Image (cartoon, rainbow, N blue to C red):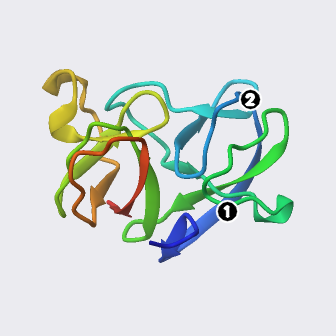
Amino acid sequence: MSNKIQISGNFTQVEHELGASGIYPGMLVMVNSDDEAVVHDTEGGFAEVLIALEDVYAGNTVDDVLTSGELEQFGIPQPGAVFQGLVESGQALEIGEKMISAGNGKFIAENAAASTDVVKQIVAICRETKTTLAADTLVKMRRV
């Protein structure tokens, strides 16, 4: 597995101040009304598809939490780009699985949504098979 979030394809890089703690590389974030990056908070909801990146300038890896209040890097994967997204524990995934926002910054499979009514946007397609995840795990996915 890659030790970075961006794997292949085109990404637009942007910077935003991190407005919340507990955000890890690979999480799906959104920009709030204060122009701060916070976790995407709507299960299956529309998303800009803004992915938290590892802070290589601070010597951090994909396993290190980002620092609240600091200016951090985020990537907007263009359609077809491959990245690692942080998938919520308990998921069992197959290649081709449709991925949505879990509503907490993580990703879940579309079929794990609380209801089909909550699914407004498929964010990515899973690109690897994973047995039931015992912990939140970075998983390779392709932006739709």
Give the amino acid at mark 2.
Answer: Gly
Of badges 2 and 1, nearer the viewer stands 2
Judge from the rendering whether residue 143 lies leftward or rightward of residue 8; answer left or right. Answer: left
Q: Position of residue 86 (x, y in %)?
A: 45, 48
Q: Earlier in the sequence, mark 2 or mark 1?
A: 1
Q: Which residue is mark 1?
A: 13
**CA distance for labels 2 and 1:** 18 Å
Q: Residue 125's mark?
A: none
Vertical comparison of 79 with 8: above or below = above
Q: Does 66 appear above or below 19?
A: below
Lateral position of residue 101 relative to residue 90, left or right: right
Q: Position of residue 127 (x, y in %)?
A: 28, 66
Residue 106 found in image quarter: top left
Q: Amino acid at mark 1?
A: Gln
Instruction: Give the x, y percent position of residue 97.
Output: 18, 54
Q: Secondary structure at mark 2?
A: loop
Screen quadrant of the N terminus: bottom left
Q: How many marks?
A: 2
Q: Check disc 2 and report the residue beneath it.
A: 19
Residue at 39%, 66% (x, y): give it: 79
Residue found 37% across the figure and 71% down from its top: 80
**Residue plotted at (50% across, 73% down):** 2
Q: Compared to 66, does 74 lie above or below?
A: below
Between 133 and 57, which is closer to the camera in this rendering?
Answer: 133
Question: Is 72 placed above or below 62 here?
Answer: above
Could you tell me residue 12's position as x and y percent? 62, 65
2 and 1 marks in contact (CB < 8 Å): no
Categorize mark 1 by other alpha carbons within 10 Å: few (<14), some (14-19), many (20+).
few
